[in-house]
């Protein structure tokens, strides 16, 4: 099922006002107006995916919001951006001009926006419903035709590869996402909200007594589970070589539990070579992190590795005041906090962020606050529970 | 490949977005807002050479205090800080180490073999966009080209795929 276009503006209004009320969206969103409709963006299979609505304050274009129309996307609000104005007309003009550059014989009767590798967008030129050209937005590079590769993993496209988001969703995920999508829309149909006009974003718009918004839930690792009487308690350790992110991540977690092993020792235990001749952790050896952490703490820590961890792993561990090691493709970091916004009436606003203590770059490291959980691929999580005191 | 004609316009657009986010308090803290300069956005290339994202440095004096990373459509991927504590610049790398391409090329050239010359550095990433690096082609007199990666003061050869590090 898809959402009719006449509901898009109202849905966008409630989604953005809720984020504003929760202060996930800053002051720059105050008094920004939401238009009646926007640019339709299609899947590569031709189905409508979402509308991109330009956001304006007065006459100034200031950003955009993407609102899903296909339930399979799971949540109505896909993305919101401020500062990057969306000008459909200008993009069409630019794209058409680029399409004709060096292609004098190009003939088409339709041009439409297509998420060729969601969320990357392209302009698709069609003649009698058949594609004649596809150009990636902004770069205007030609998007090559779909490759026929049998072994291709869903949602793991190679560079510049087109794929269909809808066709690649397994049925069960599609069903679950549709349920969550409908639940979310039901929230905005609450009788209490019937009389609210959400077309302008305002911090106070949804702060109505009976609606009872709890703004957000956020936590950082502390010295104890009592957050009130002391500061956050976690330290960044940068990786000492270009390939020791795993050693640095383990060092951070062990330091939290007051174990002092340097990266040279940890690298030796993990098989990561020496400072002069370092190497990364092979994919076949990811389980070694468990063994090494348990051995070095004489089993005081009970460490568990979880493949493809979901949000709850990180959330629950931080609630229990325990840091987590997180592997993403080719890299490892540690997680020491989370934030997500809540609405007490029904569901959650889909912003979920992790506080990442990232050992990269070498001998520096960064603290990322917040990493959007929806934009990262989480390969493994290592949780550790203190067994003995 | 990156369309150079629209690159400057997009860099301005992304830089404006970063400045707005910092000024509005959506990222960073008050001491950073007071003292920071948001530098013009730089292209981050995907391994295939196409535009992957934009890197927007935030400097305080001669230190790189933080940076933004945006997708080409302006979506904020992350805001990452080198500061360990509010107002503390001790752990922050020198701006020159990350933005001075001559210095980056020199660092790469120092790792070169006989008859290798360092080419033009380009900002990219090592396996995952979290790991921003400058890639510098080392061109042998025979014409062979190999890449070395430069991340601040660290220079290294691209690690094998399928490893974590």
Image (spheres, grey):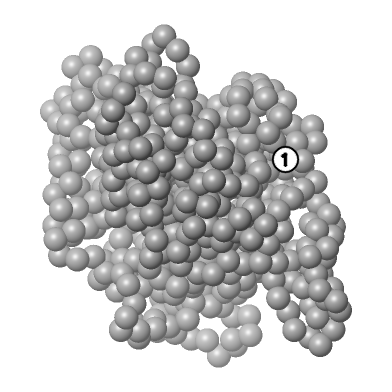
Against A31, is A305 above or below? below
Residue A340 is situated, as x and y percent measured from the top left of the image, at 34, 33
The N terminus of chain B, quarter of image: bottom right
Q: Can residue A288 be seen in the rendering of this structure?
A: yes
Closer to us: A362 or A29: A362
Against A383, is A138 above or below? below
Report the residue that reaches farthest toward the bottom.
A105
Quarter of the figure with residue A166 = bottom left
Badge 1: residue crowd in 10 Å (few <14, some 14–19, many ≥20): many
Report the residue that reaches farthest toward the top.
A229
What's the residue at 67%, 25% (across, down)? B88
Q: Label 1 belongs to which residue?
A: B93
Q: Can residue A124 be seen in the rendering of this structure?
A: no
Whether residue B164 sits left or right of residue B95 in the image: it is: left
What's the residue at 59%, 42% (across, down)? A238
Residue A169 is situated, as x and y percent measured from the top left of the image, at 23, 65
What's the residue at 31%, 66% (across, down)? A165
Residue A229 is situated, as x and y percent measured from the top left of the image, at 41, 9
Q: Secondary structure at mark 1?
A: loop
Against B24, is A39 above or below? below
């Amino acid at each position: 099922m898809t959402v009719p276009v006449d509901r898009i503006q109202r849905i966008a209004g409630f989604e953005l006002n809720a984020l504003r009320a929760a202060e996930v969206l800053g002051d720059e969103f105050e008094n920004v107006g939401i238009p009646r409709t926007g640019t339709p963006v299609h899947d590569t299979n031709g189905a409508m995916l979402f509308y991109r609505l330009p956001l304006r304050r007065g006459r100034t274009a200031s950003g955009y919001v993407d609102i899903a129309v296909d339930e399979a996307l799971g949540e109505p609000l896909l993305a919101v951006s401020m500062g990057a104005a969306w000008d459909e007309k200008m993009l069409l003009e630019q794209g058409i001009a680029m399409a004709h550059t060096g292609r004098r014989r190009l003939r088409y009767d339709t041009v439409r926006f297509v998420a060729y590798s969601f969320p990357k967008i392209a302009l698709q030129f069609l003649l009698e419903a058949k594609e004649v050209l596809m150009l990636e937005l902004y770069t205007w590079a030609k998007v090559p035709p779909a490759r026929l590769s049998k072994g291709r993993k869903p949602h793991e496209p190679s560079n510049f590869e087109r794929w269909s988001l809808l066709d690649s969703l397994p049925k069960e995920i599609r069903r679950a996402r549709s349920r969550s999508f409908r639940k979310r829309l039901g929230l905005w149909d609450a009788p209490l909200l019937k009389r609210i006009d959400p077309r302008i974003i305002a911090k106070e718009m949804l702060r109505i007594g009976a609606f009872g918004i709890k703004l957000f839930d956020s936590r950082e690792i502390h010295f104890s589970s009592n957050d009130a009487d002391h500061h956050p308690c976690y330290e960044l350790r940068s990786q000492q070589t270009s390939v020791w992110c795993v050693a640095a991540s383990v060092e951070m977690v062990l330091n939290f539990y007051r174990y002092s092993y340097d990266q040279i020792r940890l690298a030796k235990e993990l098989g990561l070579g020496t400072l002069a001749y370092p190497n990364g952790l092979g994919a076949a050896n990811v389980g070694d992190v468990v063994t090494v952490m348990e051995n070095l703490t004489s089993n005081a820590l009970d460490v568990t590795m979880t493949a493809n961890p979901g949000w709850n792993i990180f959330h629950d561990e931080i609630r229990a005041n325990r840091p987590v090691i997180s592997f993403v493709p080719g890299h490892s970091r540690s997680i020491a906090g989370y934030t997500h916004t809540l609405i007490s009436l029904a569901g959650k606003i889909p912003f979920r962020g992790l506080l990442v203590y990232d050992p990269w770059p070498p001998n520096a490291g960064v603290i990322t606050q917040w990493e959007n959980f929806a934009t990262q691929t989480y390969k493994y999580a290592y949780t550790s529970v203190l067994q003995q005191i | 490949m990156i369309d150079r004609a629209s690159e400057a316009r997009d860099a301005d657009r992304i830089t404006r977005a970063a400045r707005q986010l910092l000024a509005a308090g959506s990222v960073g803290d008050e001491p950073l807002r007071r003292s920071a300069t948001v530098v013009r956005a730089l292209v981050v290339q995907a391994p295939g050479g196409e535009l992957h994202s934009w890197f927007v440095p935030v400097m305080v004096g001669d230190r790189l205090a933080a940076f933004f990373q945006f997708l080409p459509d302006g979506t904020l991927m992350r805001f990452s800080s080198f500061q360990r504590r509010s107002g503390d610049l001790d752990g922050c790398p020198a701006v020159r180490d990350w933005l001075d391409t001559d210095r980056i090329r020199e660092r790469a050239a120092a790792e070169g073999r006989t008859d290798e010359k360092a080419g033009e550095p380009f900002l990219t990433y090592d396996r995952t966009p979290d790991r921003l690096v400058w890639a510098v082609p080392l061109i042998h007199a025979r014409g062979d080209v190999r890449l070395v990666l430069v991340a601040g003061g660290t220079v290294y050869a691209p690690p094998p795929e399928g490893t974590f590090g």
